[in-house]
Image (tube, coloured by chain):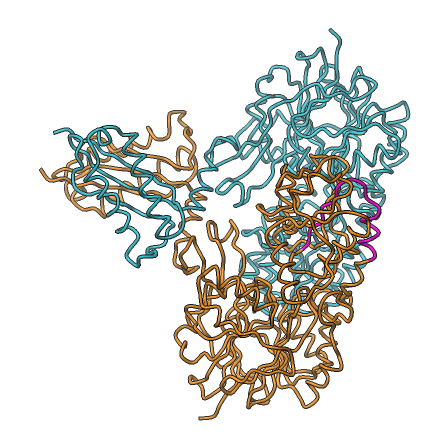
Chain colours: A orange, B cyan
Amino acid sequence: MTDRLLYLPLGGAGEIGMNCYVYGYGPAGKERYIVVDLGVTFPNMDGSPGVDLIFADVAWLVERKDRIDAIFITHAHEDHVGAVGHLWPRLGAPIYARAFTAHLARLKFEEHGHDELQIKTVGKWPEQTKVGKFSVGFLPVSHSIPESSALVIDTPAGRVIHTGDFKIDETPVVGEAFDRALWESVCKDGVKALVCDSTNVFTDKPGRSESEVIEPINELVASLDGMIAATTFASNIARVKTLAEAGANAGRSVVLLGRAMRRMVTAGIETGIIKDFPKTISPEHAADIPRESLMLLTTGSQGEYRAATAQLSRGKYLGLKMAEGDTVIFSSKTIPGNEVPVAQILNNFSELGVDTISGRDDIHVSGHANRPDLAFMHEVVKPQIVVPMHGEHRHLRAHAKLAKENGLQSIVAPNGVGVDLSGKAPKVVEYVETGRTYLDGSVQIGALDGIVRDRIRLARNGIIVATVIVEDDEPLGDCWCELRGLPEVGLSRAPLVDVIEEDVNQFLQRANRKTMSDDDKLEESMRRIIRKTAQEEIGKKPEVQIVISRLTS
Amino acid sequence: MTDRLLYLPLGGAGEIGMNCYVYGYGPAGKERYIVVDLGVTFPNMDGSPGVDLIFADVAWLVERKDRIDAIFITHAHEDHVGAVGHLWPRLGAPIYARAFTAHLARLKFEEHGHDELQIKTVGKWPEQTKVGKFSVGFLPVSHSIPESSALVIDTPAGRVIHTGDFKIDETPVVGEAFDRALWESVCKDGVKALVCDSTNVFTDKPGRSESEVIEPINELVASLDGMIAATTFASNIARVKTLAEAGANAGRSVVLLGRAMRRMVTAGIETGIIKDFPKTISPEHAADIPRESLMLLTTGSQGEYRAATAQLSRGKYLGLKMAEGDTVIFSSKTIPGNEVPVAQILNNFSELGVDTISGRDDIHVSGHANRPDLAFMHEVVKPQIVVPMHGEHRHLRAHAKLAKENGLQSIVAPNGVGVDLSGKAPKVVEYVETGRTYLDGSVQIGALDGIVRDRIRLARNGIIVATVIVEDDEPLGDCWCELRGLPEVGLSRAPLVDVIEEDVNQFLQRANRKTMSDDDKLEESMRRIIRKTAQEEIGKKPEVQIVISRLTS
């Protein structure tokens, strides 16, 4: 049997979030595997009410646990590293990452009580980690968090470049610039496949450097009176530093507000990535400083309800309160889906008389490669095959088209589609059941288990609990009902609960012994009556829970 | 007591949606009123799961029903006319609108079985309707639906111009152009207040005309092979016509898909607004025509799940099926909050191999005045006071700032803030309880009644129903539980229902007579145990419904 080189996305291909990619090498069905990234995605009321976090369903991997040799994490964004603490016990393989990423992964392991020694810090290219038939190196690439790396994955079938998230930035403020010469040297002997970030394939202009925001941010901060709060992703340490320095340059004291903000700056300092961060003061000390001399750096640029920015917009946070004459700067772009909570915060500040600056292009740049940058990357790497990842279906499809237009082979492989990359052309060889695992409180549940579907039904329809006691196949007293999430009064202007109870009791009085003796039949009949009456009274059919208590005399 | 001129927004000021404005004239507390617009806003899972429609809480008006002289509707968008069928019976005053708007309002009255004669069709300015001390005229203004009108509201305290929704468009394709000379003549003797649309106050460039999209749309349609579907708001009859003509120009047969699309075109024809709409064919006949000769005009540009565009993206709709080589054109801009459902449709089409064109500036223009257009309107009307409306708080605040920068008086009056406009300066004179009314099935409920809050709790936490039968203050048999929306198994790996029942039964065995005899105490104790055990087992605290059945022997 011939060996094959399998690429199998379990998360991140067909969506933006919960990245999880598998590479396998060996005879079909007997490959040994490495996993790239274990990320999360975030729940919402529409599809996943009550859920705390979402990650890829790794059941396929768990079944093949003994053949997983290693897990590699490209960078420390939550959609790449967020699930390590939750999923590692089921996978068990050692985790490899660079220092900054490993530092943050270890904090997650600490929270979960896992063995932190399972996370190995590795150096950048040309260092390589040999696991089974794979040899994997971390090739620095610019993004919006320190030490982002592409993976150079050497296999007997050739070299694969897995970009991770990236942009082309030669002046990234903090961390490593994109080094074209280095990349070209890595790719000069031929690359089998470029597995490539697709996020910004619909953005036609070339990307801009992180350093381009320095001057506009400094000018903006210098121009403002009153207290300033500035928010951005805490993990974008370059941006946080730019904002802090703009504050310091304007003679302001810098305050880090929000757990992630402090954790990221600490991680940057502990791993040697930031060496000259402006002096910060604690929120308690800020109270003694005139408001026009303060620069707050706050978490919550995406409208997160509990983050520092949202809390400030609703009033006080750690003794700090914004007021007329103050300004909040969003050095960020709102991710699709977060528009409404972000607007809510802007409106809250408006009600306080606080000015807000948001949606301005000159004080934010994206961390992902735009369409021309993707074409540039294709040109630098010159792969045999481009495999688009990190995108919704439309992004993958557009990216594959772009590659083909430039004369390269390409394939759209969404989650669950296994591709053999070893031949002359990519070939679909597996269709794997994939899906989502929900962290719900402390329990992991399947997205399709029906649990969340039931909750959505409760939210849409409300619930009626109807109880009846049956003695010797006769109703003992009346049925009674409890309503949740339903109007008290319907069409007939009598209390809904009374109308329903009356209809059920009338049924119980005339029900025959055969129905009364059969729980299923009795339940079904009662449910039907309740839903019919509710439909007439309030125009909707609630969920119904029937409780039958049987006594025997 | 002196008369005052009251402006009181009940909906639409502090949000974009459910417009409802009150004007009053007379001695304080004894004014007679007119109402401008009765619109809806749309529910979502985050805040209003299970709700069908949302409109302004008009309780304040209902209490003063005998003093309402008339309701005026500025134009036929749902956020201005959508609630007439639902709220009219509680208000009872006659409704005045121009022909196109009245036509659509009557369709709503028909659905509700109300008296259609209560809707009076009025002509445009200089025609005026005298009601009480008010005299109201419909002054044509361009927007994105035919016959949009500003209201010229003459009062003893002076003339008020209520813009409704508008843009400055001198070549609007269908309907009336903005007529500067007419506006200037209306305003030449002085305007007390300009109550003015604020939607696009953050858009710095001047607005573009509806006619500017004609050429790009024709070029685009001419360039495409395969079937074309194009989606836009059906009520934007100008755009629908432009798209239909582009199809006809390219030799395609035009098919209207979706109820609103047919209803709007019919309304346009019946009211004489469209005279030369291209010939359309029915979906059934479309089956006989080669796909490259079809141009579908579809509802659902905002990602509405049941609309034609969404249905096509999921497969067949009325026998039509899109495939590789076909193209879907979104001649629209996604309204904040709709990004995710729109992206879902784009991804569905991507999976079918269908190309999509969306987010393109050249094939869509907004229906609202941008910042420079607002300044222009201030300049044309030259009011004593600018009162921003139709915007979130941040829009109102920015619009008021703009007016002040241009030397005009202005005031931010969100929903519930009543302003006396009769004096030299606007003066806040009322704070009225306002809010939202939910249409839930067939029942109107208050947003703060707790009903929807309970549903949200059910969605987040699931529910446990626990039943116990008590005979002579002793438990008769065991308690038993039913779970909804909760994981079956928790930390201990035993079924969650078993673990909870066991804990409750242990409690019932040792509970004293005092607890067992008191429903409230028993319920509270059981609830506490259930929530504590659930927290330990699954890390979350469910909603709990306790059902106690008491028997006496």
* Residue at the image position 45 percent from the left and 66 percent from the top: A87
Q: Can you tell which quarter of the image residue B94 is in?
A: top right
Q: Can you tell which quarter of the image residue A151 is in?
A: bottom right
Residue extending farthest left: A553
From the image, which quarter does the C terminus of chain B lie in? Answer: top left
Looking at the image, residue B488 sits to the left or right of residue A430; the answer is left
Viewer-closest of B191 and B263: B191
* Residue at the image position 61 percent from the left and 33 percent from the top: B106
Viewer-closest of A277 and A97: A277
Looking at the image, residue B115 sits to the left or right of residue A58; the answer is right
- Give the image location of residue A280, x and y in percent: 70, 51
Q: Can you tell which quarter of the image residue B123 is in?
A: top right
How many labels, in total? Answer: 0
Looking at the image, residue B311 sits to the left or right of residue B138; the answer is left
Find the magenta span and give its range.
Answer: A215-232
Give above or below for B488 relative to A532.
Answer: below
* Residue at the image position 43 percent from the left and 52 percent from the top: A441
From the image, which quarter does the N terminus of chain B lie in? Answer: top right
- Give the image location of residue B477, x and y in percent: 16, 41
Answer whether residue B5 is magenta in the image.
Answer: no
Viewer-closest of A523 and A384: A384
- Give the image location of residue A72, x and y in percent: 54, 74
Give above or below for A15 relative to A472.
Answer: below
Q: Is residue B348 visible?
A: no
- Give the image location of residue B359, x and y in percent: 71, 57
